[in-house]
Image (tube, grey):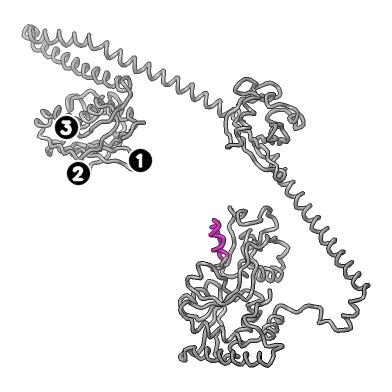
């Protein structure tokens, strides 16, 4: 890549050309005089690792085309120049922070155009993708998706790839450290400008470990200054106009090398005119071309063989059966080893069989439906369950995925992937049978509990009635002991009646209408407080109700839920302070409503907080606190019937909080 001369040289000038050149030099000197006098020197920053344009030798001295060119510029203009070569990202930071006047080795991009005024381009730089020789399939930007790309921090390549939806990068401070990292295997793909990549890979002896794509794009080298410094830009351009094309070529040849062929002498030109040399040269060129072509063909053949071997290894060792069908006829073209194992047919046998032979053969698992699925895969991929047949006639369940794919070049094929799901189907059927059995058992138990409690009411009612009759008519004739025994009978029967009533309520929770409806919990709380008003007044209790969210539920059950929880809060109050109950609610992030019924009562120890929800489980005796042991079990049943959860927490002011959730939308 030769530097593009910014101005014409002075070779072969006419008299008028020399005069015009002298005028141009005079104008350049005038522009250079516009550089601020107080600026003792100009600072140029650039990359320090971009051979042959700029790099450091073994003694850390700055070398290359650009240091020599800027040194010549300084000598021509008489302006002192400080050249600072550093990591590229640091160079860009310095010019942006105003710590430097000029930046070189800069590609022009839309983003950089916002901040810099650029010179004319002086070199064209191809920018390809380099990748590990172990990889294949890297050919363009889309093929980089899924890979982390190694880049030099601050490189224009990052902006180019990011604009094309590539955003996984590993950044390095220089091309030198980037190529070292790639040689160690830290990254498998890297975006590097071609000149430094070629130089550094050959220098490090790793060039045969990488391959390259065609250039993604070609960047152009510029020097640039921050915007709004027009006088400085004009002065720098004028300084470069003082450097002739011959001087530029001398610098370029020093670092890029000269052609091995020296300038041809007249005698050599005469010899080259002879037909013998012309034929010989043509023959040599033709031989070299044929040799290179053969090497390319051999290399391509090796690559194809390697790729085929990799594909065959994956194809035959995957755990699913794979079929490749002709897209037009549906005929089987190829199968993998797993297909042979799964169905018992060989690959050659598969090619002669219709799909129906290794399917159940009865609609919807027959040839007609199989071809219909293949046809529909042209519109969108198909995934479905299929009843398959082994060669021995046994049937088994499979899951089939069908999609179109271009294989064998641009030829469209139908790719079918089949997975044996026999164990999964067997597990699903067992689970279905278990759920059905549990559902029947639960229904039977509910029916039994309802019938038993319903049938017990009549004899219990009779016992209560006749006990009360004896108590009112014959208590004196029973004497003290008889009257006391009768009192125990009445007390026990009434307790049993309460438990039967509770059991009936418990059994009816899931037996009613399951069509839940919108419920105004604020209205329900008002009704509950009216029902409990005598108990609240008698206990001297205070009940605070905050705004409550509406829900979807069974109005009667929700009423019973709040009535039981508030009634319990009053029943299990503390003897040391008046009972205080608070009811609040809110909508959670998942859309469910959470309610809290808190009291300042005697509380529930953490070790008993699961037991209290067990039916007939009581923590106090009948004499201490009367009850049936069903209330909280009923509350839990109602909440779970509404797909919610209930738990117990400590109240910050002492006592207990019952916290439960209820849905706010129909499910």
Mark before the other along the chain sequence, 3 or 2: 3
Give the crowd class for mark 3: few <14, some 14-19, many >=20 residues within 10 Å. few
Whether residue 104 is visible to the viewer of this picture, yes or no, is no
Q: Is residue 242 left or right of residue 504?
A: right
Identify the residue position indicated by label 1 in the image. 590
Q: Which mark is residue 10?
A: none
Q: Quadrant of residue 187?
A: bottom right
Is residue 657 depicted above or below 139 in this figure? Answer: above
Identify the residue position indicated by label 2 in the image. 653
Q: Quadrant of residue 15?
A: bottom right
Disc 1 and disc 2: Cα gap in Å? 29 Å
Q: From the viewer's perspective, is the residue at label 3 or at label 2 nearer?
A: 3
Mark before the other along the chain sequence, 1 or 2: 1
Please say whether residue 159 is one of the residues in the magenta stretch. Answer: yes
Write the residue at 64% across / 70% down: 125
> In the image, residue 415 lies at what x, y percent?
65, 37
SS at circle 3:
helix
Give the crowd class for mark 2: few <14, some 14-19, many >=20 residues within 10 Å. few
SS at circle 1:
loop
Q: From the viewer's perspective, is the residue at label 1 or at label 2 nearer?
A: 1
SS at circle 2:
loop
Please say whether residue 179 is one of the residues in the magenta stretch. Answer: no
Q: Please name whichever residue, 557 or 611, is drawn nearer the observer in this view of the structure.
A: 557
Disc 3 and disc 2: Cα gap in Å? 25 Å
> In the image, residue 120 lies at what x, y percent?
58, 76
Write the residue at 70% across / 58% down: 133
């Amino acid at each position: 890549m030769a530097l593009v001369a910014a101005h014409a040289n002075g070779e072969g000038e006419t008299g008028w050309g020399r005069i015009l050149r002298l005028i141009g030099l005079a104008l350049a000197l005038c522009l250079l005089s516009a550089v601020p006098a107080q600026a003792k020197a100009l600072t140029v920053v650039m990359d320090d690792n971009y051979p042959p344009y700029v790099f450091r030798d073994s003694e850390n001295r700055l070398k290359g085309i650009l240091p020599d060119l800027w040194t010549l510029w300084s000598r021509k203009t008489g302006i002192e120049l400080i050249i600072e070569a550093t990591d590229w990202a640091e160079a860009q930071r310095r010019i942006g922070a105003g710590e430097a006047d000029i930046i070189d080795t800069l590609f022009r991009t839309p983003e950089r155009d916002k901040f810099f005024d650029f010179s004319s381009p002086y070199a064209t730089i191809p920018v390809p993708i380099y990748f590990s020789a172990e990889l294949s399939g890297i050919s363009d930007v889309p093929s980089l998706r899924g890979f982390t790309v190694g880049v030099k921090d601050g490189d224009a390549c990052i902006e180019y790839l990011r604009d094309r939806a590539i955003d996984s990068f590993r950044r390095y401070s220089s091309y030198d450290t980037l190529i070292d990292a790639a040689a160690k295997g830290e990254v498998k793909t890297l975006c590097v400008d071609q000149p430094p990549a070629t130089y550094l890979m050959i220098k490090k002896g790793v060039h045969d470990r990488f391959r390259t794509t065609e250039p993604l794009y070609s960047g152009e080298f510029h020097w640039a200054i921050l915007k709004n410094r027009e006088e400085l830009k004009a002065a720098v351009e004028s300084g470069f106009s003082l450097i002739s094309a011959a001087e530029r070529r001398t610098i370029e040849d020093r670092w890029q090398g000269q052609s091995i062929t020296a300038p041809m002498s007249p005698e050599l030109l005469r010899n080259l005119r002879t037909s013998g040399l012309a034929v010989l040269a043509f023959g040599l060129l033709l031989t070299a071309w044929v040799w290179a072509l053969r090497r390319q063909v051999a290399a391509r053949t090796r690559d194809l063989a390697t790729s085929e071997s990799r594909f065959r290894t994956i194809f035959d060792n995957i755990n699913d059966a794979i079929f490749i069908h002709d897209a037009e006829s549906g005929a089987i073209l190829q199968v993998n080893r797993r297909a042979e194992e799964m169905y018992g047919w060989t690959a050659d046998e598969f090619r002669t069989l219709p799909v129906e032979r290794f399917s159940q053969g009865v609609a919807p698992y027959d040839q007609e439906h199989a071809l219909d699925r293949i046809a529909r895969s042209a519109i969108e991929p198909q995934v479905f369950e299929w009843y398959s047949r082994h060669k021995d006639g046994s049937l088994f369940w499979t899951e089939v995925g069908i999609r179109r794919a271009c294989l064998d070049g641009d030829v469209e094929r139908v790719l079918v992937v089949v997975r044996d799901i026999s164990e999964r189907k067997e597990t699903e059927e067992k689970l279905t049978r278990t759920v059905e059995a549990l559902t029947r058992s639960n229904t039977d138990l509910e029916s039994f509990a309802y019938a038993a409690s319903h049938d017990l009411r009549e004899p219990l009612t009779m016992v209560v009635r006749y006990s009360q009759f004896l108590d009112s008519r014959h208590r004196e004739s029973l004497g003290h002991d008889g009257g006391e025994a009768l009192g125990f009978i009445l007390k026990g029967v009434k307790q049993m009646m309460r438990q039967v009533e509770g059991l009936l309520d418990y059994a009816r929770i899931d037996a009613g209408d399951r069509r839940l409806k919108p419920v105004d919990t604020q209205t329900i709380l008002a009704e509950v407080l009216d029902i409990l008003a005598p108990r609240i007044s008698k206990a001297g209790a205070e009940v605070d109700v905050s705004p409550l969210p509406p829900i979807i539920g069974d109005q009667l059950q929700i009423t019973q839920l709040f009535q039981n929880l508030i009634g319990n809060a009053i029943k299990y109050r503390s003897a040391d302070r008046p009972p205080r109950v608070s009811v609040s609610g809110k909508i959670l992030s998942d859309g469910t409503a959470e309610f809290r019924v808190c009291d300042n009562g005697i509380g529930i120890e953490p070790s008993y907080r699961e037991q209290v929800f067990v039916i007939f489980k009581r923590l106090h005796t009948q004499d201490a606190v009367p009850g049936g042991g069903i209330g909280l079990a009923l509350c839990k049943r109602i909440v779970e019937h509404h797909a919610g959860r209930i738990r117990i927490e400590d109240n910050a002011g002492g006592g207990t909080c019952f916290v439960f959730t209820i849905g706010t939308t129909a499910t």
